[in-house]
Image: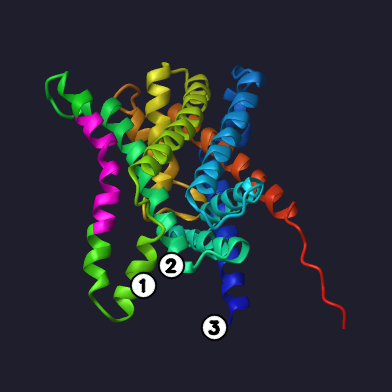
């Protein structure tokens, strides 16, 4: 199967998934009824969500810019373009195959070896998962497990500090691989090069990760609470559930269905699942997806075009 055929099949899969999702929406609600809750959401709040999501992307770009010494200084904007393109492709392609764009663009734009770029991506995704897991531990887990209330903050703090072990584990693995030969050992060493080896770098990455997610989730919680007529706490639970579904290893193309399932699952302790709650989850997904795809399109269009060499 040629590369062109594969791309055509992937595009066809996206169109089919989108068409099925749109048909399901029209069948169960109708778009007029689905979009009705937006009349109760202030336009300023929508603008705030757009600004917050772009601020979150900007902080993620700064995280890469400061962590990778191979990136030339003054190239933060290119890091932002990389983040926007990677995010858009990851949403569109099934089973997180869009993640392959990250190491490929790191190599093409900044000369970072593919394996090292993959290691950097692995580290960033582990940080994202760590932030969302800690938030879920604080907001969702207490409703399921009857543990003493003071224990949850301690567990959350311990989980939040786990990335600080990365340099130690990195050194241990590097030492173990240094004495070995073969492709696997060589590849492992290259991947480990993309993971921080100093705790000061881990602390910087953690602070940027928490800032990026905090800004984004706060805005999404506010708009979801307005759409579903819920408390801010319930809105935050739903926002965490939706975004947690996007960093899991497998999700549907565009996140259609899996995003809504994450929103409803996490909001359910404070908001019983109803058609109105599902409609609010779909609207939140439409907003998040629309911002991400529009930003990805702008990043693609704003790329410097390669000049053709003269004949």
Q: In the rendered image, which residue does mark 2 sit on?
A: 115
Q: Nearer the viewer, mark 1 or mark 3?
A: 1
**Residue at numbered disc 1:** 187
Q: Secondary structure at mark 3?
A: loop
Q: Give residue 234's quadrant in the image.
A: top left
Question: Would you say residue 12 is visible in this rendering?
Answer: no
Structural distance between the alpha carbons of marks 1 and 2: 7 Å
Front position in the image: 30 or 242: 242
| Residues shaded magenta | 155-171
Q: Is residue 211 above or below residue 85?
A: above
Asked if marks 1 and 2 touch (Cβ < 8 Å), the reply is yes
Q: Residues within 10 Å of mark 3 (few under 14, many from 20)?
A: few
x 56%, y 59%: residue: 14
Query: Residue 30: percent from the left, percent from the top?
Result: 59, 36
Q: Is residue 311 magenta?
A: no
Q: Main secondary structure of the magenta part?
A: helix
Q: Nearer the viewer, residue 290 or 55?
A: 55
Label at residue 1: 3
């Amino acid at each position: 199967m040629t590369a062109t055929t594969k791309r055509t099949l992937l595009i066809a899969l996206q169109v089919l998934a989108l068409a099925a999702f749109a048909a399901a929406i029209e069948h169960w609600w109708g778009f007029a009824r689905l979009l009705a809750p937006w009349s109760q959401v202030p336009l300023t709040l929508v603008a705030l969500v757009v600004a917050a999501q772009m601020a979150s992307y900007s902080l993620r770009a700064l995280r890469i810019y400061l962590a990778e010494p191979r990136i030339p200084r003054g190239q933060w904007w290119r890091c932002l373009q990389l983040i926007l393109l990677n995010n858009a492709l990851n949403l569109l392609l099934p089973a997180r195959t869009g993640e392959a764009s990250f190491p490929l663009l790191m190599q093409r734009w900044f000369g970072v070896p593919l394996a090292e770029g993959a290691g950097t991506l692995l580290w960033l995704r582990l940080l994202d998962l760590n932030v969302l897991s800690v938030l879920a531990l604080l907001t969702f887990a207490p409703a399921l497990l009857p543990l003493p209330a003071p224990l949850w903050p301690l567990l959350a703090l311990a989980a939040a500090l786990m990335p600080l072990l990365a340099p130690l584990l990195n050194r241990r693995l590097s030492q173990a691989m240094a004495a070995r030969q073969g492709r696997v050992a060589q590849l492992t060493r290259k991947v480990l090069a993309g993971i921080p080896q100093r705790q000061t770098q881990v602390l910087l990455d953690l602070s940027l990760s928490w800032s990026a997610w905090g800004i984004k989730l706060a805005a999404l919680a506010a708009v979801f609470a307005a759409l579903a007529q819920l408390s801010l706490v319930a809105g935050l639970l739903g926002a965490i559930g939706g975004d947690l579904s996007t960093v899991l290893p497998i999700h549907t193309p565009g996140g259609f269905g899996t995003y809504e399932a994450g929103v409803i699952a996490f909001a359910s302790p404070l908001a019983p699942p109803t058609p109105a709650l599902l409609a609010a989850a779909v609207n939140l997904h439409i907003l998040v997806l629309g911002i991400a795809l529009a930003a990805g399109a702008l990043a693609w269009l704003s790329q410097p075009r390669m000049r053709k060499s003269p004949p």
